[in-house]
Amino acid sequence: MIILMPHLYMGGAEKQFRMFFLEQYERNKDAYIIALHSSPDEKTINFKNKYKSHVILHALSKSGRWFFLCSYFAIFWDVLKLRWKRQDKIIIYETYWLPMLPILKMLGYRVIYSERNSGHHNSKISYELIRKCDAITTNSLMAQTILREATSRNDVYVINNGVEIPSQSYYKKYKKGEELKILVPARITPEKNQCALVKAFAANKDINVFFAGNIIDQNYLEELQDLIKKSVNPQNFKILGFVENMDQLYRETHLVVLPSLEEGTSNVILECFAKRIPIIVSGIKQNLIMDRNKIFIFNALEPDSLKRSVLSFRDMPPLELDLELERSYNYVLNNYSVDLMVNSFNKL
């Protein structure tokens, strides 16, 4: 199985497919990654050194007129060599590589398209290319519904994300009267909607918000920074950028907030369930996996709704919260194992 990735490390999708690779590699070493835009940072180099020829890295820029030509040539050469090693399946989850579909099929590959977002695409051509793939998967029922309708194919399968289950809870219990620490773990882009937190808590003194994630959209970053500067307590908002040790941040957090305007099945939600960390999320359809207690859902377009949810969490009886965290943990444990994810892809 080959996994074609834009980066080795970037977001939730990359983490999912690294876990898939590691599990598949441990079983029979029948797994390869091709990552086209990986920067030579320490973690990337260490991963490459450990798995050697099973991880193929390129440092192609995603900008410039030669991007598509260079990336297509790199993919072609890599998959041609791997075909000689009897590889015959490839997973793609970026639509801009789907024009290579005829070449991959000509080489004898079974092409699996894995939708990692909502299923909405701006181009009809994208849907047509997705339709021609040998197998189509999503990680949410919402995306499955959208792709079934857009591609006129009923054989669109939901494969749940895999989640690593820690042995201990990460929950940092909130004590009344102390400052509430909120973590927003998401790349900095408009659809992740970080500005909603600043609008909701611009005047609060006892709430600290930490934004942790790659800075993808510079214009949106500047908008976020401008809102922070205009707030009553700008020191209460911290933009951390990419964080290497997210586990440490999770352990220091009272509450995770996911204010997204668009999601697939969010790894953040599942990881918080597994780590027993309280999380509240925007009430978009893709997040309604959380719809078990009204305080955990808010309107992403209404800062007051977000504020009410956070304050409701702060006032929630400890026993009630403990029961909710335990129930969410069991839900992930029974439905989102890495082993189940890998077995599902291998059946395609």
Image (cartoon, rainbow, N blue to C red):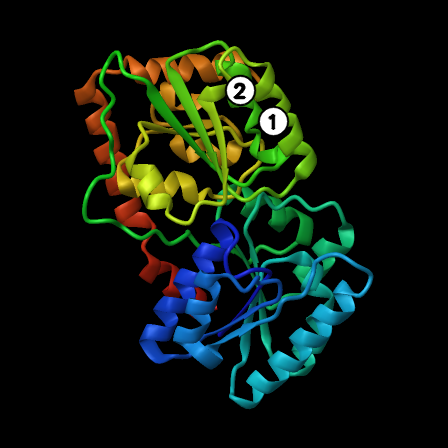
Could you say whether the residue bearing mark 1 is in a helix, strand or loop?
A: helix
Could you say whether the residue bearing mark 2 is in a helix, strand or loop?
A: helix
Residue 326 in view here: yes
The quarter of the picture where residue 59 lies is bottom right
Front-most of 297 and 215? 215
User: Are discs 1 and 2 less than 8 Å apart at CB?
Assistant: yes
Distance between mark 1 and mark 2 Cα atoms: 8 Å
Indicate left or right for 49 with 273 as reference: right
Residue type at tag 1? Leu
- Residue carrying label 1: 224
At horizontal 74% and vertical 45% (from top left) the residue drawn is 122
* Residue 346, above or below 279: below
The location of residue 244, given as percent across then percent down, is 42, 49
Please state the total of marks drawn on the protein image. Answer: 2
Query: Which mark sits nearer the N-terminus, 1 or 2?
Result: 2
Front-most of 210 and 23? 210
At horizontal 66% and vertical 30% (from top left) the residue drawn is 222
Front-most of 126 and 174? 174
At horizontal 34% and vertical 20% (from top left) the residue drawn is 180
Indicate left or right for 59 with 326 as reference: right
Mark identifier at residue 198: 2
Residue type at tag 2? Val
Q: Few, some or many C-alpha atoms within 10 Å of disc 2 (few <14, some 14-19, many ≥20)?
A: many
Q: Residue furthest right?
A: 65
The location of residue 4, given as percent across then percent down, is 57, 67
Indicate left or right for 237 with 126 as reference: left
Q: Few, some or many C-alpha atoms within 10 Å of disc 1 (few <14, some 14-19, many ≥20)?
A: many
The quarter of the picture where residue 322 lies is top left
Q: Residue furthest front?
A: 235
Indicate left or right for 307 with 92 as reference: left
